[in-house]
Amino acid sequence: MTQVCLQQLNKVFRGKGLVHAVKDLNLEIASGRITALLGPSGCGKTTTLKMIAGLLQPSSGDITFDGKSVLRIPPEKRGASMVFQNYLLFPYMSVGENVAFGLRMRHEDKKVIRKKVAEMLELVRLPGFEDRRPKQLSGGQQQRVALARALVIGPEVLLLDEPISNLDAHLRDEMRELIVSIQRELGITTIFVTHDQEEAVVLADKIALMFDGVLHQFDEPNVFYQRPASVKIARFFGGVNFLKGRKRGTQVETCLGVMNVDPQPIADGPVVLTIRPENLKLGEEGENRVRAVVRSRVYCGTHARYKVEADGCHFELVTDAANMQCFQEGDLVPLRFPREKIWLLPPEE
């Protein structure tokens, strides 16, 4: 197991102008865990992954594996193995030959190669597929072969670039479960890139969220929902309910009245109050209650989604489907903001 550290990492591309793809990135990736590099397209996450793999040279900064710099070590000797988004299997080779490629480059014994290839295909749940060609496989099967090819050489660090983005929806859950299962069995330090917050939350032990080449928050998945560091981060993770106010101690003055909140590590003054749609309470009396008009409702099977309006402020909430018949469009109903579910953020610049 290997700890990966990125220290003041920068990457600048030179073309018609200078593009600062990654800016002063500091990140400590724990040994034997799964870490997601998350963010929208063009935020620098794949560039970061390629620098860790040795496929791109940083403009400045350092990358260490267990405290030792790997910048002068070529990709094939670095101990990091990368699985690309488009699989990149050799079409003229069989599955077995694809998986064995790295071992053959190392001039391993043929018997050892056959044994290791069989073990890897068993690990990725493709036993007996050695003689098939890539064109005979589904997208999910090709991704598994690419994963086996990366793992067969026994890397210290596994790098995955958008590992399930090319798969149909019904295959994604299966591939997620497989990746986690393999990672837990091998204990290999794994870093993967994704733009999908759901994928990051399901797979990762910790998430590094990037915007425009800059790391904005590095935390466990639940923290991004419960305690996002900014309005921008809250929005990226599906936050839709925001209310400006002024904090004084454990109270926030808003256009809807005074809201009581739990003590939070943010200075008194202007703030933005946010609360997740699933945490708003429709039809409940009590503390932090306002009157709201139901503007729309949508039945979603196990739950119902509502849009409500209170004194010109609009909110969205999710409630159990059993409550759907209780509220009709146009109804004036209580809307409660549980104090323990309110999170305060700095105002947007």
Image (cartoon, rainbow, N blue to C red):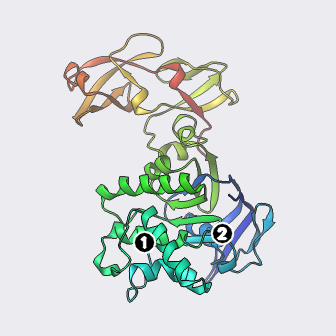
Q: Secondary structure at mark 1?
A: helix
Q: Is residue 255 visible?
A: yes
Which residue is at 71% across, 57% downward?
3
**Mark seen at residue 315:** none
**Number of numbered labels in the structure image:** 2
Q: Nearer the viewer, residue 27 or 108?
A: 108
Mark 2 is surrounded, within 10 Å at the Cα level, by few (under 14), some (14 to 19) or many (20 or more) other residues, namely many
Residue pointed to by mark 1:
145
Which x, y percent locates residue 144?
A: 42, 67
Residue furthest right in the image: 68
**Mark seen at residue 52:** 2
Query: In the rendered structure, which amino acid carries the disc numbered 2?
Result: Ile
Q: Nearer the viewer, residue 299 or 268?
A: 299
Residue 269 sits above or below residue 148 on the image: above
Q: Nearer the viewer, residue 334 or 35?
A: 35
Q: CA distance from mark 2 to mark 1?
A: 22 Å
Which residue is at 47% across, 50% downward?
197
Which x, y percent locates residue 60?
A: 76, 72
Query: In the rendered structure, which amino acid carries the disc numbered 1?
Result: Val
Residue 140 sits above or below residue 74 on the image: above
